[in-house]
Amino acid sequence: MKQIRNVVGALLLGANFCACGNVENKVAPAIPADPEIEANIQQWLERMTLEEKIGQMCEITIDVVTDFGASKEKGFTLSTAMLDTVIGKYKVGSLLNVPLSVAQEKEKWAEAIKIIQDVSMKEIGIPCIYGVDQIHGTTYTLGGTMFPQGVNMGATFNRELTRKGAEVSAYETKASCIPWTYAPVVDLGRDPRWSRMWENYGEDCYVNAEMGKAAVSGFQGNDPNHIGAYNVAACMKHYMGYGVPVSGKDRTPSSISRSDMREKHFAPFLAAVRNGALSVMVNSGVDNGLPFHANREFLTEWLKEDLNWDGMVVTDWADINNLCTRDHIAATKKEAIKIAINAGIDMSMVPYEVSFCTYLKELVEEGEVPMSRIDDAVARVLRLKYRLGLFDNPYWDIRKYDKFGSKEFADIALQAAEESEVLLKNEGEVLPIVKGKRILLTGPNANSMRCLNGGWSYSWQGHLADECAGAYNTIYESLCNKYGKENVIYEPGVTYASYKNDNWWEENTPEIGKAVAAASRADVIVACIGENSYCETPGNLTDLTLSENQRNLVKALAKTGKPIVLVLNEGRPRLINDIEPLAQGVINVMLPSNYGGDALANLMAGDANFSAKLPFTYPKYINALATYDYKPCENLGQMGGNYNYDSVMDVQWPFGYGLSYTTYKYSNLRANKALFTADDEIVVTVDVTNTGKVAGKEAVLLFSKDLVASSTPDNIRLRNFEKIALNPGETKTVKMIINGSDLAFVGYDGKWRLEAGDFKLKCGDQWVDLKCAETKVWETPNK
C-alpha cells in the first residue's frame, strides 16, 4: 500500500513542480492583471510568516466560532474566545455558512461580519472573506428575494433574466455584508437520478455555459479586478463532471471519457472563466479512480495554466479529509493535504478543525509541499480579497441597500417564475381555466412553500421554508387569490409525514377518499404532485417512479370523469408514465421558489402565457435514461436480419419541449454561407410568426448535426438560442451567429477537430445544409 501511495503522490506532484505563476504561458490572461493589486500581493508575501500564509488557505464554518449557549437567549452570537483561537492564533482567512443552520436578518449578518473583520484586521491586517451558498437568490438572508432554482432558469432560455437574477442576488448579498457567493452551479444535469439535478441549468453544456456567463456578469459586474459596491465574487461549481455519477447517487464515482470531459463538462467553466469568474469550487467526487481534489491535471493544467487564470480554487465541504477517510488515496489527513495542495487547491473548506494549518506547516518544513505552491495559493486568496475591495472596506453600511426585498426585485423574480414553468400537455384546451369554475386542489405539494423552494432555501434541506416564507403564497393561496377562495376546494388526499421531517420522502396514511368525494363539487381537478424538498446526498433515491400514494390519488380522481391538470413540483423528473394519459393538462413547475405559486396562478388563468421549455430530457421508463445529444446507435429500433435491436429513444418529453397558449410558425431558415471553415462566422436567420390569438414569448433554439465524423457524432447539438416576444400575427426575423469552430468536437485523441464534410442546421421544423470546406485540428487544449 505504501508503494502505491508513493506512486500516486509522484504523479500528482510531478517531477518538477512549478507554481502556475511561474509557467511560461502564451495564452492571454483570462483576467488582465492589475499592477497595483499585484504589487500589494508581493509585499504581503514578502512579510507574511508561514503561519499567516497557511491561515489564509484555511476556511472554517461559522459553527466553530458560534456561542451556542448565548445564541439560545440572544439569537446568533459569536464566541470571542473561538474567534481569538481561529483568527488570532491560526490566522484563518475565510469563514462560511449560515449561522445556527437557518437564514438570518441582514442586520444580524452585518453585525457578525463587522466583529469578524475587526478581529481579522487587528490580528492579521488582512480581511476575512465570508462565503455563502446563495444559489437561487438571497437564500440565506430573511426577507431577501428568492429566484427559481437553476433548472428553472435554464427552462427560461433567457440569458437576461439569469443575469438580472444574479444581479439582484449580489445586491442583497452585499446588503448582508457578505462579498462571496458559491454560485452559479454549472454542473450538467445529465442523470435525473442525481439529487442535485435541479441546482444547474439542465443537461446541455451550451445552456450551462451561457447561463453561467450571464450569472457571472450579474454577480460581479463588468470589471473583475474591481468588484463594485453592489456586486460579489462568483464561485463556479462544481468543477467538474459532478452530474453524471455512475450510480446516479450524489458524491459517488463517475466514469467520464476524456473527450466528454473536455467538450461538455469543462465547457461551462471555460466560458465563465473567460468571462471573468473569480473563483471555482471543486467537484466532491471521483472520476476514473482519481478524486477531483487530487487531480493536478484538471486543477492546475486545464484550469490555471491552459487558461492563464489567476483566480482561486476552493474545496467543497471537508473534501481534502475525504481523500483519506472516504476515498482512501491517502493514509492520513496530513498526506491528503499534501496531495490536494500540490494538485492545485488554494483554499481548504476544512470546515470544523484547524489541524489543516498544523499539518500544512509541517509539510512545508519537511519539503513535501514547495513554498512556491504556498505563495501561489496565498497570492490567489489575497488577489480575490483585493479585487473585492476588502482591504479598504472589510464591511460597509448596509443602510444604503434600500432596494433589499423591494417590489422591483420581486417583479423580476415573478417574471422568472412565469418564464420557467413548462406547459407539457393541454388536451381539449383544458387550460387556461376560466374564472368562475370550481377547482379541486389536491396533492401533497398544493399548500407548501418548502416544496416550491427546494433545498438551499433558508436552510440546507429547505425544511424551514414554511416558517421563513410565510409572506409568500403557496399554490393554494395563489389560486384562492386568483379565483376566489369560494371556488377552490382544498383536499390534499396525500400529505408528507412532516414538514420538518428529515426523511423527506415519507408520506402519511393517504386519505384519497376525501379527495374523490370532493371532486363531485368541482369542475376541474388540479393535482399538485412531485417531491418534498431535499439537498445533496440526503436526496439520493433508488427509484425515480413517483410515489405510489400520489399515483393512486391521480388514478382514483380520474375515475370521477372530471378533467385533471397535473402540476409537477419536483427537482428532477419523476416517472409518471402510468398517470400521464389520465390527465388532460400537465404543467412542470419544477422548483420556482417564492413567487412560483403566483406565477402558476397567472399562467393557469391565462393572465400570463407559457414560454418555458424543458432544459432536460424527461424519461418515461426507469431503465431508459437519455439525453438529447445521444449517439445514433442509441436509437435504431429494428435492425437488419432476424432480431430486434430494440434500442429506441422513447421518452416522456424531449429536451426543448414546451407548449404555449399560442402557436408559432418557423420559415425561411437561412445561413449566410453554405461553405465554411473553422475561422468563418456563420450568420443564421429564421422568420418566426405568432399564428395564434394571444401574445407570447418563444425560445428559438438553433441545433446542428454533423453527418459523418471520425468519432461517432452526437445525434444533434444545441448551438444558440434567443427568446423573442411576438404579438398575434407578428413575424420577427431572428438572427443568431455561430462560429465555424463551434461545430468542432473533441476526438478520441483528445484534440479539438473540425472535419471537412456535411452539416445540417435545425430551427423549429426548418433545416438548412452546410458544408465544411477543410479539416482543422487544434494543437492547443482549447479552441
Image (spheres, helix red, strand yellow):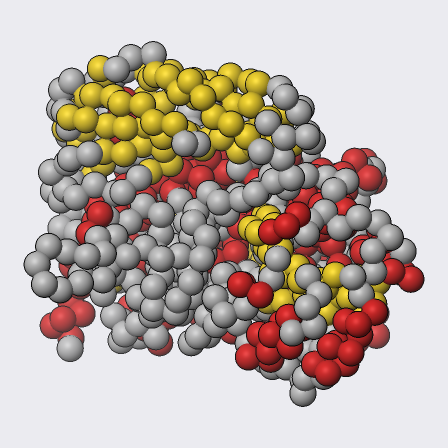
In the image: residue 557, left or right of residue 56: right
In the image: residue 255, left or right of residue 91: left
Viewer-side residue, 688 vs 116: 688
Q: Position of residue 275 (x, y in %)?
A: 45, 30
Figure quadrant of residue 358:
bottom left
Figure quadrant of residue 774:
top left
In the image: residue 285, left or right of residue 632: right
Viewer-side residue, 388 vs 57: 388
State the residue at coordinates (25%, 70%): 329
Q: Position of residue 515 (x, y in %)?
A: 75, 76
Quadrant containing the N terminus in the rendered view: bottom left
Above or below, comparing residue 501 to residue 239 in the picture: below
Farthest-out residue, bottom: 509
- Is any part of residue 111 visible from this angle? no
Quadrant containing the C terminus in the rendered view: top left
- Is any part of residue 259 visible from this angle? yes
State the residue at coordinates (27%, 34%): 705
Q: Position of residue 498 (x, y in %)?
A: 70, 80
Viewer-side residue, 764 vs 124: 764
Above or below, comparing residue 285 to residue 107 in the picture: below
State the residue at coordinates (79%, 72%): 520
State the residue at coordinates (50%, 38%): 211
Q: Position of residue 161 (x, y in %)?
A: 62, 35
